[in-house]
Amino acid sequence: MTTAVEPRRRLGVTVHPGLVRHGGVLAVLLIIGTFTALRSDVFLTGPNLLNVSRQIAVVAVLAAGLTLLMTAGGIDFSLGAIAAVTHGVTAQLITAGAADWLAVTLAVGLGALIGLVNGTVVTLFRVTPFVATLASSTILSGAALLIIEGQSISIGEHLAGLGFGEVFGVIPALVVIAVVVCLAIGCVMRWTAFGRNAFAIGGNERAARLSGIPVVRTKLLLYTLGGLLAGLGGVMLVARLGAASPGTGGLHLELTVVAAVVIGGTALHGGSGTLVGTILGVLLLGVVANSLNLLQINPYYQDIALGAVLMVAAVANHLRSRRH
Amino acid sequence: MSAFGTRRTRSLLAVALLAVVTAGCSVEKTPAGSASASADPARQLTLGFVNGNTIEFHTCLQRSIEARTTSAGVELLTANSAMDPAKELANIDDMISKQVDAIIVQTVNIDSLEGGIARANRANIPIFLTSVASVDQSKILGAVITDVKKVGRELGEWLIKDDAGGKSSVAVVGGAPGAAADLMNNAFKEAVGGQVKLVFDQPAFWQRAKAQEVAENLLQAHPTVKYVFVHNEDMALGVLAAFKAANRSDIKILTNGGSPAGVKAVVSGEFAVTVSNTPRSVGELAIDNVVGLLRGKTGVKKIDTVKDILITRDNADQAPPYCA
């Protein structure tokens, strides 16, 4: 029952609990930001911050879907691979002469379909989500290479409006999409029965089923939504890159997305999580990657720095959440 | 009864499958091994090719090797190590157990290849390397190398000549730290010496999307940069996308590869210069030399270098084909 009450309480007392809850990540973000700003003049300039926002847009879209799924106790390890597949499919459709909107729609639809298959395997065959999606991730990484035949496929000027366009002359179109997606998912989590059902399922699946929540339908929808957003992420990747290329998306992207959601404080076992936390996690990873380049950190130290940041953020997060 | 029946059918099927697989493995082999291979020039040869990755270069390398073995009437078995040194070792072991006449390896990491070479030597199966050969050359049948140091040096020399004492700012967007990328980079740095200002050197791990991000960060950190050396063309196209988005057509891109997309970019002036260094010629030369060495032909060089050509707008029409 607590799960049903919790969101309403958070709604009443607005800013403060959020600040407290995400204090750990915020602190790490501020420390790294300050450190970089002191050492590099360009870090805090408008163009560089827009630059970071453009770089994290795809991760944010995938992470938003995963946050909702993880609060319901699910996990999807194939999101990066779905993005790899749809980025290849979009490029192939466009080079084959399909209209841009058609290619995008088909690719996003394909993402949703793959998500639905994942959901079906998890709910109907009761395979552990981790195992099921790890398997589909492996299949899809292979499929992604097959689709583009292991080579780069240029889409020329197609989708340039999406990849390089700006709204009001400043805000990159990709960022606008990411913001819209995050707002929508945030609203779903907070104010809809569907979102509350997800929390309830993650908190205690049996209790949720007994209290009349349509568990199977909700889970199927969550996996489908995750797949759909990953499909959209793939389209954003190909638009931004101007081409499909082997090694884009896949496991590398997946690990970043999972890391961002976990840093954001979403519990791996479900029942708790916020989109604000996820956005902070995405932001933290984006800022770290940006400052590694700006500060000219030796390549050998980059992985060490990234891992250390993950570790510190996760520990800070845990200490914070335990106190509340 | 019926349950017993299905289980029996299943095990029969498994045995049949196993038989097929084993039959497939023992392709026309004399058990004597490789020692006698050179004696009989008419004997059917079977070669094993262990590829290192699935990006464009490796895809094309494999295609050219497949095409050349077919035209030479040689049997070919292939495996892919997907950038994983442990998997490479396992693939070499597999080739040894299949008793091929020689193993050709496009290694993922020259340092971890030592173990694989030792095993092949113990099993008395000759091993042949493509792209790099910085190992004890008495232990290998031979190698076809691309002289990455020469590539770095040539591009460095081109830059010095083009800059004509301008002391411009130069950046490097590299592959993965270690092995070939470092060799190429050090030769490049040596060639440019103190005649330019090297302001930025960061890795993009051979990924086009990552290269685009790194280039965006470069523009923030060092907007006055005049030349960028990118370790391969796929990444260079990512860098180009970043420059285009920032309306920077003044920065000259130096790169390495010779792929159709790369040569096209040179023709259109988007890349200033590239080095044609094609996987097609590596693959063809490798098969010619392996077959020559195994059959004891005279005049075959043990360590052979693939011919490379510096491609600028003036001679772009002479660029050899990249893929088979």
Image (cartoon, coloured by chain):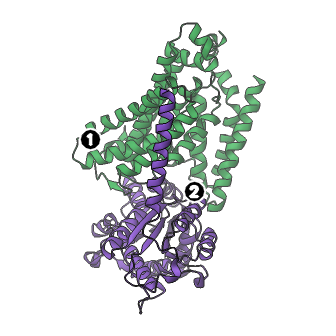
Chain colours: A green, B purple
Q: Residue furthest bottom?
A: B298
SS under mark 2: helix
Q: Position of residue A300 (x, y in %)?
A: 65, 61
Of A83 and A74, nearer the camera is A74
* Residue type, label 1: Asp
**Between tags 1 and 2, which lies in front?**
1
The amino acid on which the numbered mark 2 sits, given as a three-letter code, is Asn
Question: Farthest front residue?
Answer: B1
**Closest to the observer, B276 or B53:** B53
Find residue A264 and report its horizontal and vertical position in percent.
Answer: 62, 33
Whole-percent x and y of residue A223?
A: 48, 28
Disc 1 and disc 2: Cα gap in Å? 34 Å
Residue drawn at the location 44% of the way across and 38% of the way down: A175
Relative to B68, is B290 on the left or the right? right
Q: Position of residue B18 (x, y in %)?
A: 49, 51
Near mark 2 (Cα within 10 A), the count class, few <14, some 14-19 or many ≥20, is many
Identified at 30% across, 51% down, the residue is A155
Question: Which residue is label 1 attached to?
Answer: A100
Whether labels 1 and 2 share one chain? yes
Mark 1: few/some/many CA within 10 Å (<14, 14-19, 20+): some
Label placed on residue A293: 2
Q: Is residue A164 visible?
A: no
Q: Is residue A46 above or below residue B89?
A: above
